[in-house]
Amino acid sequence: MFTLKVLKGKTTVDFFDFDKITEGYNSIIVDIGTGNGRFVYKNAKKNPDIFYVGIDPVSENMAEYASKSIKKPSKGGISNALYVVAAAEEMPRELYNKADKIYVNLPWGSLLEGVVKGNPVILNNIVNISKPSKAHLEIWFTYNDLHEAGEISRRNLPSLSVEYIEKTLFPIYQSCGIDIFQIDIVDNEDLKEFDTQWSKRLGFGRARDVFRIKAVIKK
């Protein structure tokens, strides 16, 4: 069992009353590999009836937006967001069966490798935190030989294509309880609308294919 560790400003603390603070919200949305947490903070401000959880193993990455979230409302503080310090491979049990929707937005490192190769540990943890009966999953990912040759070689990443997703990832995901129902290739303009620091950097860079998977989690 992994204890729920939460970033309060720049300090990591143990947290025990997740159910209490999420009570009364219409839904819970989880962003795995949240990076700096901008996606969580911006969307939580736009949707005060939804509770957002950002998860990342590097607490320093989330410090800026975790600090903003605990300020007074008049100074940008919000009460419907939480930043959890954890890796996708070691998801805290306190989050099991909680998420109505899960995002994995432009992952990197072991998380990217996990979703594009179908690592069962990561996929099962995504299923573990999803709400029973039916939850939704959306994953955006991109890399190519021109820009990320080193990471591709280091992690032995497969060549990305719709065919690869359909023939290789689809059955792996399905075996874990994740049914992919939509595969899109989006462009730089779509990335610009996606409110994260990394998506904006990629969106204003050279043209590239970005793959988006939408799926339903059933358990």
Image (tube, rainbow, N blue to C red):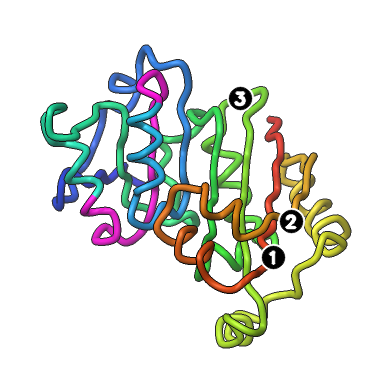
**Amino acid type, mark 1:** Asp
Left or right: where 202 falls relative to 75: right
* Occupied quadrant, residue 66: top left
Residue 198 coordinates in the image, percent (x, y)? 44, 62
Residue at point 63%, 33% (across, down): 136
Q: Compared with residue 199, is residue 12 higher up or lower down, i.e. above or below?
A: above
Residue occupying the point 73% across, 74% down: 158
For the record, the magenta segment spans 47-64
Circle 2 residue = 185
Give the mark, 3 or 2, whose residue is nearer the N terminus: 3
Q: Are marks 3 and 1 in contact (CB under 8 Å)?
A: no
User: Disc 3 vs disc 2: Cβ atoms closer than 8 Å?
Assistant: no
Of circles 3 and 2, the one toward us is 2
CA–CA distance in space, label 3 to label 2: 29 Å
Q: Quadrant of residue 13?
A: top left
The secondary structure type at the circle numbered 2 is strand
The residue under label 3 is which amino acid type?
Pro
Magenta stretch holds residue 57: yes
C-alpha gap between disc 2 and disc 1: 6 Å
Q: Which residue is mark 1?
A: 209
Q: Is residue 133 left or right of residue 96?
A: right
Per the rendering, the mark at residue 132 is 3
